[in-house]
Image: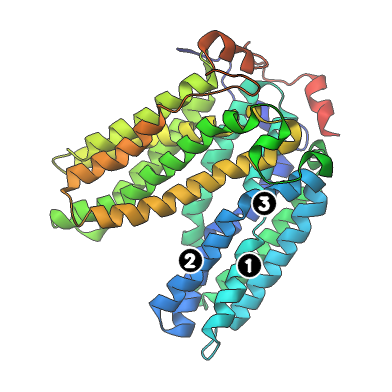
Amino acid sequence: MSTPLSRPSYAAVLRVPHARRTFAAALVGRLSYGTVSLSLMLSLTRSTGSYAVAGLVMALFGATSVFLSPYRASLVDRHGPRRALLPMALLYAALLCVLAAACRPGTSEAVLAATAGLAGACTPPLGPTMRAVWAELLPDRLLLQRAYSVDGVAEELLFVSGPLLVGGIVAVASPVVGVVLSAVLVAVGTLAFVTSPATSALRPAGREKSDGPAPGRGGPGQGRALLQPVVVAAAVGVSVSAVDLLVVAFAGERGLGDGTVAWVLAALSVGSAVGGLVNGAVAWSSPTRARLPFFAAGVGLCLAAAGLAPGLGTLVLAVMCAGLFVAPALTTAYLIADESVAPGFRVRAGAWCNTAVNAGMSAGAAVVGLLVERLPLPVCFAVAGAVAAAAALVPGYRRGAARPAGGAGGAAQSSSVSSVSSELPESSASSES
C-alpha cells in the first residue's frame, strides 16, 4: 500500500519562503479558539451564577460559529484573506471584549446571549484559510500531505495547551482576562497572517464564481466530489466526541477515579498526533479516496473493540489505536476536499469539512448521552464505532467524474509521487510572491 519516503522530513515544508511566518501567525490566531471556550464558560458561570444560562449562551456562541462557517469561508474565497479575514477577526475580537465587559452581575441574559451569538457569527476561518494557503504554496501533493499533517497535529496541541493556559490565568486573575486574551490572540495572529506575502497566493474567486455557499458551484461534480470527505469528517466527529462520555461511564462502572478519564483521553490525543505524523511521512501508493475509507474503518473498529476492554490498560491501548486513525482520516478528508474544488473554492471546501467535524461532535455527544443510560456500555462503544465504519462505505467521486474514483484513476490525483528532495525547487517558491 505504501512505501516510506527516502528523506522523510517535515522541514521541507517549513523551508518554503514565508511558510514559517505564515504558519506561526495562523497558530497564534487559532490558539484563541483553544482559550475562548473555557474562559467564556467560567466568566459566564461566575457572573450569572447559573449553569443553565452559561450553557445557553455557550450553545448560541458555538452554533453561530459552526453553522455559519461555510458562509464566512465563502467571503474569504470571494474577496481574499486580506479584505475578508481581517475585518472579520477584528469584529470578532471587539465583540469578545464587549462580551468580557458584559460578564458582570446584573447583566441581562438576553444581552449576553445576543452578544455571544454575534461574536460566534464572526469567527474567522483561520484553519481552512491556512490549509488553502498550504495548497497554493505546495503544488506537490506529497509536501501538501505533510503540511496538512503537521497543521492538524499543531491544531490538536493548541486545543490541549489552550485550556492549560486558561487554568494558569484563573489561578491569578479573573477568567474575563482569558476572554480578553482570546480577543488579542485572534486579532494579532490574523493581522500577522494576512500581511504575510504568502497570503497573496490565494486569489479571490470573484463574485461571478461564488454566488452562494453551496460547494457545487465551482464546476461539474464538485458537490458530489465533496460528499465523501464531508460525510467521513462528520462521522469521525461523532465517534470521537462519543469517547469522552463513554470513558466517563466506563470509569464510573468500575469505580475508577476521574483522573483515569484524563489518562484515557490523553491516550486518544497522543495516538492521533502519532498517527498524523506517520501519515504525513509516508509516500502512499494508493490514492487519497481509497485511503479515506480505510482510516474511517480503523477508527470504527478500534472503538468497537474498546467496548470489550476488560480493564483500564486495555481500554487505553484500544483508544490509542483508534486515535492513530483519527488525524489521518481528517487530514485525508481535507486533502480530498482541496483536490475536489476549483482553486477559488478551497477555503470553503475546508470549511465544509470543519463544519462537518464540529457538527458531528455536537451530535455525537447528545446521542451518546441518551444511549449510555439505556444500553450496555459495550453496545454504546459499538454504536459509536459503527458510525465511522459506516462512513467508510460512502463512495468517492472525482470532480467531473460520474462514477466512484478507482485505483488507476485516483493515481492521477497526485501531482507528483516521486521522492521529494530536502530542498524545494525555485519554481515552487515563486508562487508565494
Q: Disc 2 residue type?
A: Ala
> Residue 201 appears at what percent x and percent y?
80, 36
> Residue 258 appears at what percent x and percent y?
25, 60
Residue found at x 62% / y 17%: 413
Mark toward the start of the polypeptide (1 vs 3): 3
Q: Farthest residue to the top: give it.
A: 408
Residue found at x 29% / y 31%: 301
Judged left or right of residue 349, residue 387 is left
The C terminus lies in which quarter of the figure?
Answer: top right
| Real-space Cα separation, disc 3 to disc 2, in angstroms | 19 Å
Q: Please say if 144 is above or below 116.
A: above
Q: 313 or 106: which is nearer to us?
A: 106
Q: 220 or 347: which is nearer to us?
A: 220
Q: Disc 3 residue type?
A: Tyr
Q: How is the image coloured?
A: rainbow
| Real-space Cα separation, disc 1 to disc 3, in angstroms | 15 Å
Q: 26 or 299: which is nearer to us?
A: 299
| Secondary structure of residue under mark 1 | helix
Q: In which quadrant of the rendered view does residue 129 lie?
A: top right
Mark toward the start of the polypeptide (3 vs 2): 2
Residue found at x 27% / y 57%: 370
| Real-space Cα separation, disc 2 to disc 1, in angstroms | 12 Å
| Mark 3 in CB contact with mark 2 (< 8 angstroms) | no
The N terminus lies in which quarter of the figure?
Answer: top left
Q: On the image, numbered disc 1 is attached to which residue? A: 119
Point out which mark residue 369 bears. none
Q: On the image, numbered disc 2 is attached to which residue? A: 59
